[in-house]
Image (cartoon, rainbow, N blue to C red):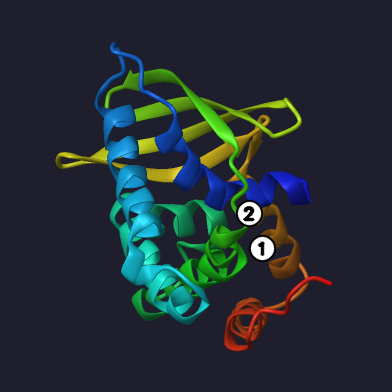
Amino acid sequence: MLNHRCLLLIPFLLISLTLGMAPSWAGEPTQQVKQTTDKILAILSNPSLKGPAQAEERRKVIGQTVDERFDWEEMSRRSLARHWAARTPEEKKEFMGLFRDLLERTYLNKVDDYSGEAVTYEGDTIDGNYASVKVKIVTSKGKEIPVEYRVMKKQTHWLVYDITIEGVSFVNNYRSQFNSILSKSPYSELVKRLKDKTSFPEKKSP
């Protein structure tokens, strides 16, 4: 399972990648991931979006930018695994929305907690329409954390469908949780739990 600290690094990855220079030999997947994170840094640097009063608008714009790079359908399909095929088109659409909202509430709302983690690009590996973009996070305490963005090409865009942190897959982590629920309860129970998590204001940790 992903530990709490590694989970909190996900929104920081979206920001801190802009602090490192992509190697000159980096391929198109790395360059496209960097383009997205450059946009996020520009949003955070925008004076008109700074301050608590603009927090909701800031996170909304960041969420829209993330949507351009993340393949929510692919992430949802892989996270729901064998249970995806049994869903109707309407159920799939609903699940994608709930899954995206869950991730935004859990991670993107913590984007203001970014504390300057540094990241080094380590290049990418391309295999047909699939690729991995490897980076290394260096925390303020000097700990190095390997991270891998897994992306797939759709037309001319490389879209993220999974993130691996210290060898643990983000998608596999949720797949395990969802499967645990579905092994004991009907699909409607999973939907109910997702709605419960996305319907109420996020509680701040003490």
Quarter of the rendering occupied by the C terminus: bottom right
Task: Choose top left, top right, bottom left or bottom right for residue 90.
Answer: bottom left
Residue position marked by numbered label 2 in the rendering: 175
Q: Is residue 107 above or below residue 95?
A: above
Q: Residue furthest front?
A: 47
User: Closer to the camera, 112 or 190?
Assistant: 112
Q: Position of residue 71 (x, y in %)?
A: 36, 53
Q: Is residue 45 above or below residue 190?
A: above
Any part of residue 71 in sight? no
The answer to whether mark 2 and mark 1 are in CB contact below 8 A is yes
Q: Position of residue 139 (x, y in %)?
A: 68, 33
Residue position marked by numbered label 1 in the rendering: 178
Residue found at x 47% / y 59% = 76
Q: Residues within 10 Å of mark 2 (few under 14, many from 20)?
A: many
Task: Choose top left, top right, bottom left or bottom right for residue 132.
Answer: top left
Q: Residues within 10 Å of mark 1 (few under 14, many from 20)?
A: some
